[in-house]
Image (cartoon, coloured by chain):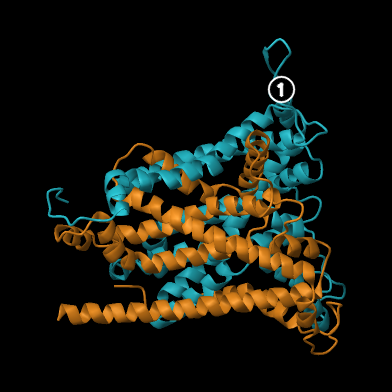
């Protein structure tokens, strides 16, 4: 843009925007997110070094000024020691990783053929199918988990139907089991897997498949050698969209899981609301963040750089 | 060339089963909501009594009102901040704080909600101690919702801005329009669809949030998902069936309408492009 272009006289707002335009645009989101997203982690870090106390808020001050005007710092690493000595945190974190991994795999196994079939449908059908897959994505997550409960509980639709058909003679125990947690995660996150897969498969150049078959490739080989590698971006994007929220999932294990399904999100929730131990909860958050978000941030950084190039 | 045209019965049946898996629970829930019996296992005849009961449940009505207010405020705030962030990231090239801003608009998308909730609560509690604001309640819920919704708005608007044709805006400025006027007259109409869809997305995300709200809300401010969760945790509740059916149908209708409008706009755009090409 040429700064020497002819300009009309303009309003105060216009002049303000011209002079400080960039700052006026950059600063509001930057400052807001800094204060309400990033700085909270600093407070969590500070409070993770405090100790639980019977007061409001329920933790000790990290510093105080004594009568002789000296500042006393009291930082305690006992919360972090506690995380390592009480095995529930490490165990539940590993259990969350395992659950997230296998539910991502299940979503991939179910979602891939679905996305593949969608990509092969006619253009008009594709539009309708897109809407059909997106609709649950917009529908309340909590209500969908509750709806699933209506199917799998002891007197739910599934058991009623199976009993009526004579397939089983006693209701299947599904609620409050590991199977229910997997079912819940797959049910909730399947659209997140299907959509990115569909987006890459839909753009796939079918002439490559034709070339493979002209050169004597069987359909299955052509799929493994051509389609699958080309759809890897979708596989990765979909898997991340399922895996990451599944690790920290709270609602599904709390509503559908049993006492054994101790996922880290649930442990964290209980630490906070049942035990009222805020400093330990803060320490768990920070530790969780370090083991989870460290690698994520690096991944994000390289992805952004790749995009910008 | 696309993959269109070929399909095997096996693939089609997997697709149909997958879609059935997604929809059967919701359809069954709507069915249950018309069950006269409060027992989930017994069909006591068709009844709309639970819907009537809903209208007299003060707790649910109050929570619904709070949730709608929060969602409207949070999505509007997020729309403003997210659009500004998107403009900065797409149009300003390199600037100080760019990496920080990029990180902060992407991080909420991958951050477990429970961690966002805990850290924000710790912030609000500490702020209240230090500066006497904000006390926990509607304000804190709105602030934390704005933070995560801003991320979704930025991503959506960013991708639309990237594809928008910059030369029109430059032409307007060459003809004497100020950057602000060029933006308002030229760019804003182009990105309007993205603004509308990101506002709607923020609205639904805010309306649906349970985890973050549970942490940052105060004792007398329960949002609708919080009330639903506390009831659902105790087992089946027929009035929640009715409420859930209403929400599912309302969202379904909105999504179908939006889908129809987008497809119509797309068709018109293609037609325009064809006419312009001839």
Q: Quadrant of the C terminus of chain B?
A: bottom left
| Residue A104 point in image, percent of width and height | 58, 56
A13 to the left or right of B134: left
Residue at 62% over, 56% down: A103
User: Observer-nearest residue: A84 or B247?
Assistant: B247
The residue sitting at the top extreme is A68
Vertical placement of residue A103 versus B94, above or below: below
Residue at 85% over, 87% down: B44
The quadrant in which residue B213 appears is bottom right
Give the color of chain B as drawn. orange
Vertical placement of residue B5 versus B237, above or below: below
| Residue A297 point in image, percent of width and height | 48, 40
Vertical placement of residue A261 versus B18, above or below: above
Badge count: 1
Q: Is residue B62 visible?
A: yes
* The chain in cyan: A
Q: Is residue A108 visible?
A: no
| Residue B273 point in image, percent of width and height | 23, 77
Report crowding for label 1: few under 14, some 14 to 19, many 20 or more residues within 10 A (C-alpha): some
The quadrant in which residue B67 appears is bottom right
Q: Which residue matches tag 1?
A: A76
B13 to the left or right of A50: left
Q: Give SS at disc 1.
A: loop
A45 to the left or right of A301: right
Q: Quadrant of the N terminus of chain B?
A: bottom left
The residue sitting at the bottom extreme is B46
The subunit carrying tag 1 is: A
| Residue A210 point in image, percent of width and height | 30, 71
Residue at 80% over, 55% down: A258
User: Observer-nearest residue: A209 or A246?
Assistant: A246
Vertical placement of residue B146 versus B48, above or below: above
């Amino acid at each position: 843009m040429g700064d020497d272009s002819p300009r009309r006289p303009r309003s105060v707002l216009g002049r303000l925007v011209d002079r400080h335009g960039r700052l006026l645009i950059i600063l509001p989101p930057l400052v807001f997110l800094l204060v309400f997203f990033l700085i909270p982690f600093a407070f969590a870090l500070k409070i993770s070094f405090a100790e639980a106390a019977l007061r409001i808020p329920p933790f000790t001050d990290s510093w105080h000024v004594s009568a002789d005007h000296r500042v006393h710092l009291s930082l305690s690493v006992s919360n972090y020691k506690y995380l390592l000595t009480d095995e529930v945190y490490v165990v539940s974190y590993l259990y969350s990783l395992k659950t997230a991994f296998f539910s991502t795999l299940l979503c991939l196994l179910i979602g891939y053929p679905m996305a593949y079939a969608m990509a092969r449908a006619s253009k008009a059908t594709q539009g309708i199918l897109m809407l059909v897959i997106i609709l649950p994505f917009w529908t309340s997550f909590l209500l969908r988990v509750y709806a699933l409960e209506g199917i799998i509980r002891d007197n739910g639709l599934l058991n009623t139907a199976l009993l009526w058909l004579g397939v089983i003679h006693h209701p299947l125990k599904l609620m409050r089991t590991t199977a229910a947690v997997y079912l819940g995660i797959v049910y909730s996150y399947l659209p997140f897997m299907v959509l990115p897969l569909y987006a890459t498969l839909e753009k796939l150049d079918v002439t490559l498949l034709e070339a493979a078959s002209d050169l004597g490739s069987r359909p299955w080989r052509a799929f493994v050698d051509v389609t699958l590698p080309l759809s890897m971006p979708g596989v990765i994007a979909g898997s991340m969209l399922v895996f990451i929220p599944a690790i920290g999932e709270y609602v599904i294990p709390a509503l559908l899981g049993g006492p054994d399904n101790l996922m880290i999100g649930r442990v964290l929730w209980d630490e906070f609301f049942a035990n009222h131990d805020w400093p330990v909860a803060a320490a768990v958050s920070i530790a969780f963040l370090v083991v989870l978000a460290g690698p994520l941030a690096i991944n994000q950084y390289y992805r952004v750089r790749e995009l910008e190039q | 060339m696309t993959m269109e045209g070929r399909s095997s019965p096996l693939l089609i049946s997997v697709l149909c089963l997958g879609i059935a898996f997604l929809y059967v629970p919701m359809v069954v829930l709507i069915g249950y909501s018309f069950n006269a019996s409060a027992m989930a296992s017994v069909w006591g005849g068709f009844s709309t009594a639970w819907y009537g009961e809903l209208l007299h449940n003060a707790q649910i009505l109050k929570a619904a009102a709070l949730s709608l207010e929060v969602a409207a405020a949070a999505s509007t705030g997020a729309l403003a901040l997210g659009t500004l962030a998107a403009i900065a990231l797409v149009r300003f090239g390199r600037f100080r704080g760019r990496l920080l801003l990029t990180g902060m608009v992407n991080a909420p998308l991958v951050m477990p909600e429970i961690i966002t909730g805990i850290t924000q609560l710790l912030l609000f509690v500490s702020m209240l101690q230090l500066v006497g604001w904000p006390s926990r309640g509607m304000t804190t819920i709105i602030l934390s919702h704005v933070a995560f919704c801003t991320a979704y708005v930025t991503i959506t608007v960013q991708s639309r801005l990237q594809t928008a044709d910059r030369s029109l805006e430059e032409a307007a400025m060459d003809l004497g329009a100020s950057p602000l006027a060029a933006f308002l007259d030229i760019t804003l109409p182009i990105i309007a669809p993205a603004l509308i869809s990101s506002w709607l997305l923020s609205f639904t995300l805010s309306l649906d949030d349970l985890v973050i709200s549970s942490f940052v809300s105060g004792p007398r401010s329960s949002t609708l998902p919080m009330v639903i969760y506390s009831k659902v945790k105790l087992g089946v509740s027929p009035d929640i069936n009715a409420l859930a059916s209403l929400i599912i149908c309302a969202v379904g209708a909105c999504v179908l309408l939006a889908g129809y409008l987008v497809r119509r706009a797309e068709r018109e755009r293609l037609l325009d492009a064809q006419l312009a090409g001839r």
